[in-house]
Image (cartoon, grey):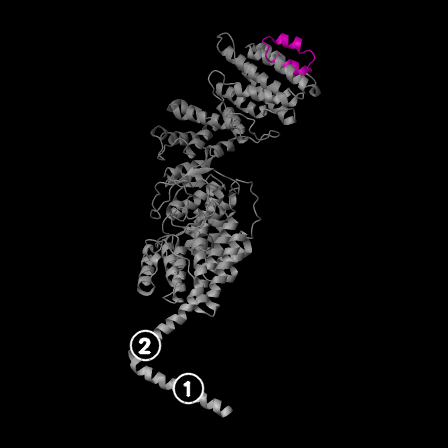
Amino acid sequence: MSTRNWPRHLLCLSLSVPFGPALACGPDFPMQLLRDRAQALAELPEGNFAFEVNRLGQQLAGLKPTTEVTLMPYWDGDDNDRPYRAQRSQVEASELPQNLREKVARLRTLQDPQQVEAQGADLPDELRLYIAGAVAFDAGDHAQAVDYFNKVLALPAEQRKLRSTWAAYSLGRALAAQSLEAGDDAQAVPEPLRAQARQAFQQARALSAEGFSDPLELGVASLGEEARLAKLAGDWDSAVQLYASQSRLGSGNGYSSLRQLADELVAMPDEPLKTLLQQPMARKLLTAYLLSHIGWDYDRQQPVEERRLPRLLQASVGDKLDDADRLAALSYQAGDFAAAEGYLRHAGDTGLAWWLRAKLALREGDKAQAATAYAKAAAAFPRDESWGARQTPDWDYESVKPGCRVEGEGAILALERGDYLQAFDQLYRSQEIYWQDAANVAERVLTLDELKGYVDAHVPAPAAAKAEEGSYVPRPVATQLRELLGRRLLREGRYDEAPSYFDTPQLQADAKAYVQNRKDAVSRWTATGRAEALYAAATLARTSGMEILGYEMAPDYAWLGGGFSLGSAEIQPGPLIGAGELQRQQATEAKPDLRYHYRYVAADLANQAADNLPHSSQAFAAVLCTAAGWVPGSDQERALYKRYVGQGPFVEWAEDFGKQCEAPRFDQANKRYVTEALDTARDVLRPYKAQILPLGLVALAGVAWLWIRRRKTKA
């Protein structure tokens, strides 16, 4: 068996457990909606904390998403700022000419900002003043640092293109440090300094957005710095929104800060938490935390200390229902369906609201209303909305794109009512997310003509992917579907149509060779020729069967390269499985319905080859021996060996039948037909040899007399 590349996360031992129960040791497999249809319709996947908090952030014009330049906090003993200094030095080295680069590096080692001014007199003003401010900041003289950074910002715009954003950001940091120092002084008032610091951070963002140099992405970093000051002042609304805006721009610092704020909310006693939840953003942050199950334990259970939080959150909402769909989702997940329905009256037409309405309609048994709600949910969700990856209660993984998920759940209802093509289309549109479900419908539920019509109309062959040497390129789902169709066409004997659906020249060649061998097995004149063609087809079925004949799903699991088995795909009649689907599934099951079913097909073809060979020939023994080795330990292996023992010739290598087999010599098999005919004649005539010998002599004498007479006549 040859296999194609599997996803690289499939690294454990093969599984052979019943289909349906939770799988034991092995890799994480994708969730299949059709495995437990009732569960798929009943559950609402948990939200994604990053997605939920990013919704709370503002879209800030002019600020670009972060790159690898934005560093995460780095804790390294007593020198946590080392990565930032190294990054700053790299930037300065890249943007300054060689003569300035060396001078700037030297000036940064000084301890006195006045020395910087004196020794850097030949530098541009913005560089000299900024470095002097940085030296003052490192020395702890924040007031002097503020003065220098203000001097940079006071320069004409054309004279501070390199350090405007840096100066505003550093000014904010220096003012923030001063506010902390003022907080330690009973006579000082830190609030004005914090306000000035926040203004400086806002200025840093404005300068970055205007196009002033910002290679360190300080405009985005300023969001987190300002948020920290807002939090210190008790302004949770501003803090959450600023951190969320930072996170929305791709900064992990914004995300981690919101995690910390959420943890603070969870740890608060009831009374201070009630007060804080009057601030809308604090309330929304707690909603995001609870909806995403981010604090749940390894066994997917909500910690005891969190179970009070939904009640406190709902009590704080009152008539402030701008997040009604999220509150409805929380209520649904908690099993409070009446509360969920109440919130949905105020939830509008969001995708989440319609999704929940569909689920509540199913609980009431109204599948028509549920189907309508699913369609509205699919239309309302942005196609690119993603909630990230989750682990299901069965330890499968799911990449949650809600638009795809609601279409998948709608497909379950479509299957039940017999709209098989619609169900397949909805599942296929998810591409790799629910590919296993789509594949199951494609090869087990749709008729072959339905599947071929869909592929021909909607799934053209993708362009060949270009991969760098040694890199892994996932196969397009369109390619997988087309090859699924090609394999099904071969299995069902529609040979001429199949090869063009295979992706690679090698697979197309294998498919064409298999087709030609199957045709030759019918059309060749001699029995030996037919046997040779059948054996060639059998060999291809064994060596390339996974790729040209295997089922994508059970029993072969071609999507896993055959390396894993998830058990049988047998289904039982139930509330969500109609009789029509059941009948179609039964009609398309593998024959035999065993893992690597194509090996048994190969062995059967070899057995048919033996039917066309003289039983006394070496080829007869060789094809049976080889076929037995393809299906070790099976009833078919035992039947092949029994046939050899009863009908075949003695061969020395038969002692290890199925394991050490010679290649069949078809060229010698024809001779055995003549030999077998003569042997049969001898066996039949042997009892009459006493009578036959005189008769033979008489006949020979008669022939001789006729010959002599003819010679005389001619003479």
Q: Residues within 10 Å of mark 2 (few under 14, many from 20)?
A: few
In depth, the one of 315 and 675 nearer the eye is 675
In percent of width and height, residue 522 lies at 46, 67
- Real-space Cα separation, disc 1 to disc 2, in angstroms: 25 Å
Q: Which residue is mark 2?
A: 684
What span is in magenta? Answer: 107-130
In which image quadrant can residue 135 be found? top right
* 157 w.r.t. 510: above or below: above
Q: Residues within 10 Å of mark 1 (few under 14, many from 20)?
A: few
Q: Residue at x 42, y 86 (%)?
A: 704
In percent of width and height, residue 91 lies at 61, 22
Q: Amino acid at mark 1?
A: Val
* 693 w.r.t. 572: above or below: below
In depth, the one of 490 and 688 nearer the eye is 688
What is the secondary structure assignment of the residue under circle 1? helix
* 436 w.r.t. 628: above or below: above
Q: Which residue is mark 1?
A: 703
In depth, the one of 540 and 103 nearer the eye is 540
Q: Say if the magenta span includes residue 117.
A: yes
In depth, the one of 156 and 504 nearer the eye is 504
